[in-house]
Amino acid sequence: MDMQTSFLDRLFEKGLLIDTGVDGLYGRSGQFEDVITAFERLIDRTGGIDGAEAIRFPPGINRAHFEKSGYMKSFPQLAGTVHSFCGCELDHINLLKCMDEGDDWTKEQKATDIVLTPAACYPLYPTIAKRGNLPKDGGLYDIQSYCFRHEPSKDPARQQLFRMREYVRMGTEKDVTDFRQTWMDRGVKMMETVGLDVEIDVANDPFFGRAGKMLANNQRDQNLKFELLIPVTSAANKTACMSFNYHQDAFGTKWGLNLDNGQVAHTACVGFGLERIALALFAKHGLDVQEWPATVRETLWG
Ligand code: 5GP
Ligand code: ZN
């Protein structure tokens, strides 16, 4: 059995994660959630002084915004659309018959106006653009959402529905690159205070297909994405528990995000993978939270 499957089995046995029969779709115990809540308090304590505007969206995005985002060009393999039954009574009878006979009953499901959120910051850009020009110092937002990515796996650190906490900065190139550097430094310190071994490395997103290879190379060459890596199921293949993304003026141009002087805004976001951070803590300190080092417990629970 590989390390990922055995860690997943141990998490199930301990009841920290709850098997639903679908790889990457898990319930979480109160204890697991308590670790996430405590870590989010650490994020609040670290980022709170910046005075970000907190906004929470449900884990679905307006389909028109999703289409405009270009996500289907880059990551069609990861997207999840919400479909519903929209038929008449006769269609309903046919649907039930199909289900009874074990046939594919989903063929007639129709796309709704909602798509599952692929990254927590996606609904933010059109929302802020609608307000008009940014304030004088740009914008800073605190976001958290469940996100969906269709990538079933036995690796507990690769889930299909997971939470991402993000800070998003909109402003000048200097504003947003300074913000990103600040969070890279803060991220390393935060992980060290909870006893995790970290490393920051340049990264790229899993863009789809042959054309995607070029996008990935470009992202790497221009240092647009960094990840904070922590050993979870393997010391050799570390897991990205935070990412630091500089979008240049791509989202500003796409969504019409402008500075107070009318120039196109640059944007950057930093994301914490909350389940991954909790899993990194369990992998490092053991599955019994009472046994974690006192300094780590003190940082998380005071
Ligand atoms: P990104 O948008 O950079 O791919 O993801 C942002 C953060 O979300 C990552 O650094 C990671 O911590 C978390 N994340 C990405 N994919 C997954 C996943 O499949 N499962 C889980 N649990 N977290 C993920
Ligand atoms: Zn983001």
Image: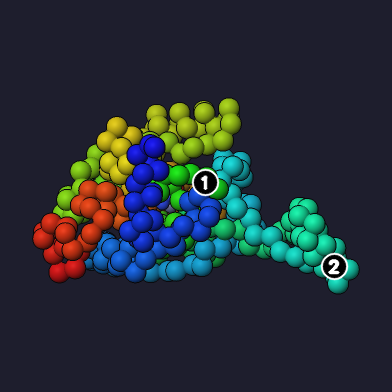
* The furthest residue to the bottom: 89
Q: Label 2: which residue? A: 93
CA–CA distance in space, label 1 to label 2: 32 Å
**Is residue 159 depicted above or below 4 in this figure?**
below
Inspect this view and state whether residue 231 appears.
yes
Sequence-earlier tag: 1 or 2: 2
Disc 2 within 8 angstroms of ligand 1 (CB): no
| Residue type highlighted by circle 2 | Ile
Most foreground residue, 195 or 14: 14
Q: Secondary structure at mark 2?
A: helix
Q: Secondary structure at mark 1?
A: loop
Label ID, residue 152: 1
Most foreground residue, 226 or 274: 274
- Location of residue 2 in the rendering, given as x and y in whole percent from the top left corner: 38, 37
| Residue type highlighted by circle 1 | Pro
Image point (88%, 68%), residue name:
90
Q: Residues within 10 Å of mark 1 (few under 14, many from 20)?
A: some
Image point (28%, 63%), residue name:
35
Image point (39%, 56%), residue name:
12
- Location of residue 273 in the rendering, given as x and y in whole percent from the top left corner: 37, 53
* Picture quadrant of residue 212: top right
Most foreground residue, 164 or 183: 164
